[in-house]
Amino acid sequence: MKSKPLITVATVTYNAVKTLERTMQSVAEQDYPRVEHLIVDGCSKDNTLSIVQRFVERNTTLEMPHSIRLICDHDEGLYDAMNKAITMAQGNYIVFLNAGDKLHEKTTLSSIVKQIEWIRWNHANPAIIYGETDLVDDNGNFIRHRRLTAPEKLTSKSFLSGMRVCHQSFYVSTELAREVPYNLKYRYSADFDWCIRLMKLAEKRRMRIHNTHLILTDYLNEGLTTQNHRKSLFERLRLMGHHYGWPATILEHFWFIVRAIIKR
């Protein structure tokens, strides 16, 4: 029997008053009715929580309100908060949307659901759903399409050439995600590692990975990884060595490694 999945859009925040409204507005505008917007806040000291409260109050006046849930708790960093979101999510699928990021269109979620023909408790449902990403500036204006485009067929080996799918355009079965928490030993690239491990598990169980061929996310061109670009690149190389072996990693990234060594 066909039905509509509940989609959890998880947003981790801490002092995000400058960027959160854009993200919450984006979720509120979706024409898809079965949405849970889960805000996991690390006890912000600015007016972040007042923005959440304003959307909660406005939500009660809408003809087709979506669910807004706020979890306010101290955490051990971004990825620890994301693990909390996975544990608390009520949706059939979960996607992480940072404060400042947006769903690309008002129809993004409904367009995804139309494609996948989701059936409750059916093993044929996609384990992972993915698409493309655009980069935007602080005002939400288009900068360019993301340089790394999504492969036609995404596999666990696709990330050997880089993170081919943006984390914010990577929707995962919540049930599967709970089996693969973020590894907190990685400070900048736990999302990279998380995606690879999820794809490996999906492949092992012969679960479907679905390409929407859609731009799913407007990604704010700033963040933890962007701010610590050099450190994150070296951490990512170590991750690739772990998942793909050093010979393949060095061969794929030979000139990058040489340039990085020269600059040190």
Image: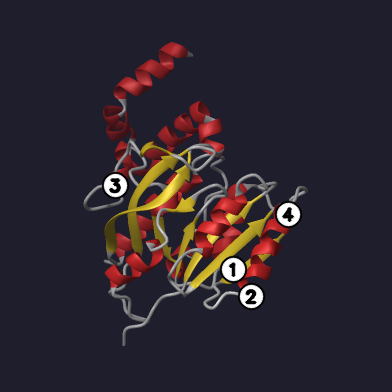
Q: What number is the disc on residue 137? A: none
Q: Secondary structure at mark 4?
A: loop
Type of the residue with mark 1:
Met
Foreground tag (4 vs 3)? 3
Residue name at image x 27 percent, y 30 percent = 252
Type of the residue with mark 4:
His
Q: Earlier in the sequence, mark 1 or mark 4?
A: 4
Real-space Cα separation, disc 1 to disc 4, in angstroms: 15 Å
Q: Secondary structure at mark 1?
A: helix
Q: Earlier in the sequence, mark 1 or mark 3?
A: 1
Q: What number is the disc on residue 150? A: 3
Image location (x, y in percent) of residue 245: 33, 38
Q: Is residue 139 left or right of residue 105?
A: right
Q: Earlier in the sequence, mark 4 or mark 3?
A: 4
Q: Quadrant of residue 59?
A: bottom right
Q: Secondary structure at mark 3?
A: loop
Q: Extreme left residue here?
A: 152
Foreground tag (3 vs 2)? 2
Foreground tag (2 vs 1)? 2
Type of the residue with mark 2:
Thr
Image location (x, y in percent) of residue 48: 70, 52
- Residue at which label 1 appears: 88
Q: Earlier in the sequence, mark 4 or mark 2?
A: 2
Image location (x, y in percent) of residue 254: 30, 23
Image location (x, y in percent) of residue 28: 53, 64
- Residue at which label 2 appears: 60
Type of the residue with mark 3:
Ala
Query: Dot 3: few (<14), some (14–19), or many (≥20) neighbours within 10 Å?
Result: many
Query: In the picture shown, does residue 26 fall above or below 5?
Result: above
- Residue at which label 4 appears: 74
Residue name at image x 54 percent, y 38 percent = 138
Real-space Cα separation, disc 4 to disc 2, in angstroms: 28 Å
